[in-house]
Every structure is written in structure tokens, then in C-alpha cells.
Amino acid sequence: MSSDLVEWSGTGGKMQKPLPELLKDYDLAVGIFPRDATNYEFNEETGKLTVFIPSICEVGYKDSSVLRFSTTVTGYLEKGKLADVSGIKTKVMVWVKVTCITSDGSKLHFTAGMKKTRNRDAYEVLRDGVSVDKF
């Protein structure tokens, strides 16, 4: 990645890597979040990740799944897992809050009231979010 993609974090002026690179380092698909979700805060000590999204939106993935994002998404990032997620929903007949995303290499597992497994390659490409009225 070119150095012009590096964002400055608000904590002490420390440079931080682009969000897709951070997700890759933690074994998660780089395209989970919308393409314009470039600002985030990550506390390496606690693992708390806060991602800022410009507007409430939905992202459609190549496996026909859809995730809806609030303007702030939080969770705890560890190897192959984003747990205690707040700010993401998926539709399972009705919109249900996503609480955890785990990876086992080729698959991503979404916990939203129940666990939903999807092929990871559907989430490896950054996609644009489509604005929606409400989260």
C-alpha cells in the first residue's frame, strides 16, 4: 500500500495503517466495512476498535448478503474475530444486530441472534455503502 493511504490517529499523532490492512493483520476479510470507512480508533492494549462511517448505509456483497452500518461501529478485535460488535445489522427475515464476526480461513461466521456462516471471499473486496434512512 502506498504511504498516502496512511491515516493519522487522534491519539498522540501516531500514524495508523489503513483499516483494511488492520483487518488483514487480524485475519479478517478486508472488505467487511464500507469503502468510505477510513477513520477508526484502535486500542492495541484492550483490542477495542471504533470505526467511523460517514453516513448510515447498507453494503451488498457478492454472495447477496447485506450488512447495514450505523455511523459508529465498535467491537473488540482479536486474531480472526471481531467480538461484542455494536453498530452492524444483517437481515434474517428482519434486521438483527450483529454481535460477533469470526474467521476460520475460508469462512466468516456472523453471530446475530444465531450464527450465520458465509464464504469469506465475498467480503475480500472493498465495496461502497448505499445510504439508507435509518439504522
Image (spheres, helix red, strand yellow):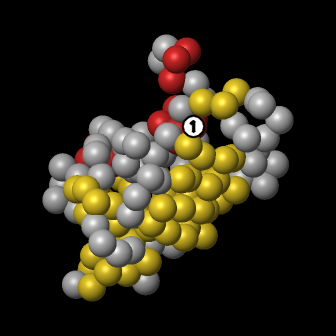
Most foreground residue, 85 or 118:
85
Please state which of residues 70 and 94 is positioned toward the viewer in this rendering.
Answer: 70
In the image, what residue occupies the spot 43% across and 77% down? 97
Give x and y (percent) for residue 20. Answer: 48, 37
In this rendering, would 60 be left or right of 106? left
- Tell me what residue is drawn at x 55 percent, y 67 percent: 85
Q: Residues within 10 Å of mark 1 (few under 14, many from 20)?
A: some
Identify the residue at horizontal 43%, vertical 83% (top origin). Answer: 113
Q: Which residue is mark 1?
A: 22
Camera sees residue 18: yes
Q: Is residue 41 shown left or right of residue 1?
A: right
Residue 93 sits above or below residue 86 on the image: below
Q: Considering the image in quadrants, where does the C terminus appear?
A: bottom left
Can you name the residue that lies furthest to the top here?
2
Left or right position of 100 against 13: left
Q: Position of residue 25 (x, y in %)?
A: 57, 35
Secondary element at tag 1: helix
Residue 127 in the figure: left or right of residue 43: left
Q: Position of residue 71 (x, y in %)?
A: 48, 61
The structure residue drawn at horizontal position 40% and vertical position 43%, both measured from the top left corner, is 36
- Residue 105's spot in the image, x, y percent? 42, 45
Q: Residue 96 sits in which quadrant?
A: bottom left
The amino acid pointed to by label 1 is: Leu
